[in-house]
């Protein structure tokens, strides 16, 4: 009997449900006569900022741009250093470099895979001008100790929220905890669109005003550059579609959490598996459901043989990639990060994943460890 493939992520079953609404929204926007930076973008910026609990939202082309422009809005550039992690998506670091800054990597917590605040203090120098924690997998980084360090030193926090839209830390939504938060609306993300998109949220009026200029050639009133700017816009049609999906995002996350509970129950105590943790005071959005095992590569291959796609996010920490060798980090410099890269595996996780499919993933993993 042929088994159907279980993808790591797919959107087609969601699209089947939404298709009529989506096509109506596309037609409404295309018929409006306005395609860029118009009322749909303004509307979505307001709604998304309110959803996160921030005063302002500035729509941009991607989260990479959101991070880059946020660093620019903070006035950072050549000679400034930004403290972040090496087990993140490449764009976190690419954005720091695009802004002319140098990334300084701090090792992570072995259970959450997130920036380890106890290792931050020893890396702080006068050149560090920003803390950039990444809320990887959908779980918030440990913000309270980071806020303490940042306020003691008078430096801002920029949160990479690309994987964690809506996650809460002590009741506050991520992105609204630091000075600014950067979000991705790339299709796979918690709130995904039908193409690229991103946003910076902030409650700092000056940062918001600066971001609005920076995303639009440095212009403010009319065709006149107040400062050197860039081009990073959000389309009207993406904004309208994202606004539609924003109204459904809590339901989508509820579904992700249900799948996580099924995995939690079915995989507890199996082999040497370590399952995702949720820290006290935190909520987990389960962008990824990432497990750890010493037999990662063989498990991944075994699942592949059962038509189950499990991915590695991420197989090589950034400080060990050829593109970032010039930073001068050696193997062994971030021991926890490097060990995790050899042990982590992300199971299929998306709202439309069926109960039966999740059980099939569990059965396959149990079979692997019973061989
Ligand atoms: C996806 C992602 C980004 C980049 O988002 P884009 O919208 O694709 O530019 C940045 N950081 C993290 C952690 C991500 O997962």
Image (cartoon, rainbow, N blue to C red):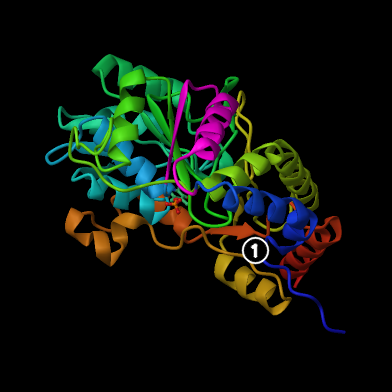
Residue at image position (65%, 61%) is 9
Q: Nearer the viewer, residue 258 or 11?
A: 11
Give yes or no for residue 138 being in the magenta stretch.
Answer: no
Q: Identify the residue at the far bottom of this view.
A: 1
- Left or right: residue 81 versus residue 284 is left
Task: Classify residue 247 by image quadrant.
Answer: top right
Query: Which residue lies at the image location 83% right of the left edge and 83% below the top edge?
Result: 2
Residue 69 in picture, x, y percent from top left: 31, 40
Q: Is residue 344 left or right of residue 78?
A: right
Residue 116 picture location, percent across and down? 41, 35
Q: Find numbered disc 1 in the image and state the secondary structure of the residue it sits on.
A: loop
| Location of residue 74 in the rendering, given as x and y in whole percent from the top left corner | 26, 29
- Residue 191 sits in quarter: top right
The answer to whether residue 258 is above or below residue 226 is below
Query: Who's the residue at 78% across and 69% down the image?
Result: 367
Residue extending farthest left: 79
Question: Mark 1 highlights which residue?
Answer: 8
Can residue 85 be seen here?
no
Q: Quadrant of the N terminus?
A: bottom right
Image coordinates for residue 127, horizontal then vertical, percent: 15, 32
User: Where the C terminus falls, by quadrant?
Assistant: bottom right
Q: What segment carries the magenta color?
A: 35-60
Q: Nearer the viewer, residue 256 or 327?
A: 256
State yes or no: residue 51 in magenta.
Answer: yes
Of residue 327 and residue 59, the one placed in the foreground of this image is 59
Residue 166 versus residue 5 in the image, above or below: above
């Amino acid at each position: 009997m042929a088994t159907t493939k279980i993808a790591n992520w797919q959107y087609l079953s969601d699209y089947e449900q939404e298709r009529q609404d989506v096509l109506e929204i596309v037609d409404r926007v295309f018929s409006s006569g306005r395609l860029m930076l118009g009322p749909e973008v303004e509307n979505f910026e307001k709604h998304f900022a309110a959803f996160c609990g921030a005063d302002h939202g500035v729509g941009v082309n991607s989260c990479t741009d959101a991070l880059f422009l946020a660093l620019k809005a903070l006035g950072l550039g050549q000679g400034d250093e930004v403290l972040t992690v090496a087990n993140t998506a490449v764009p976190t670091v690419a954005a720091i470099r695009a802004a002319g800054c140098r990334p300084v990597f701090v090792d992570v917590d072995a259970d959450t895979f997130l920036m380890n605040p106890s290792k931050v203090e020893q890396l702080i120098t006068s050149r560090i001008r920003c803390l950039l924690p990444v809320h990887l997998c959908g779980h918030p980084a440990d913000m309270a100790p980071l806020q303490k360090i940042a306020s003691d030193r008078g430096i801002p926090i920029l949160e990479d929220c690309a994987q964690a839209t809506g996650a809460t830390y002590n009741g506050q939504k991520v992105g609204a905890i630091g000075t600014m938060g950067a979000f991705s609306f790339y299709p796979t993300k918690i709130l995904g669109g039908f193409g690229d998109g991103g946003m910076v949220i902030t409650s700092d009026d000056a940062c918001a005003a600066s971001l609005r200029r920076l995303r639009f050639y440095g212009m403010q009133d009319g065709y006149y550059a107040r400062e050197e700017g860039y081009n990073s816009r959000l389309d009207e049609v993406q904004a309208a579609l994202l606004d539609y999906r924003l109204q459904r995002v809590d339901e989508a996350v509820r579904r992700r959490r249900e799948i996580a509970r099924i995995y939690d129950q079915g995989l507890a105590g199996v082999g040497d598996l370590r399952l995702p943790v949720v820290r006290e005071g935190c909520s987990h959005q389960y962008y990824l459901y990432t497990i750890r095992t010493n037999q990662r590569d063989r498990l991944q291959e075994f699942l592949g043989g059962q038509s189950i796609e499990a991915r590695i996010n991420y197989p090589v920490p950034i400080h060990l990639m050829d593109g970032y060798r010039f930073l001068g980090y050696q193997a062994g410099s971030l021991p926890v990060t490097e060990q995790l890269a050899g042990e982590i595996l992300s199971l299929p996780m998306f709202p439309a994943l069926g109960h039966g499919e999740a059980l099939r993933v569990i059965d396959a993993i149990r079979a692997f460890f019973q061989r």
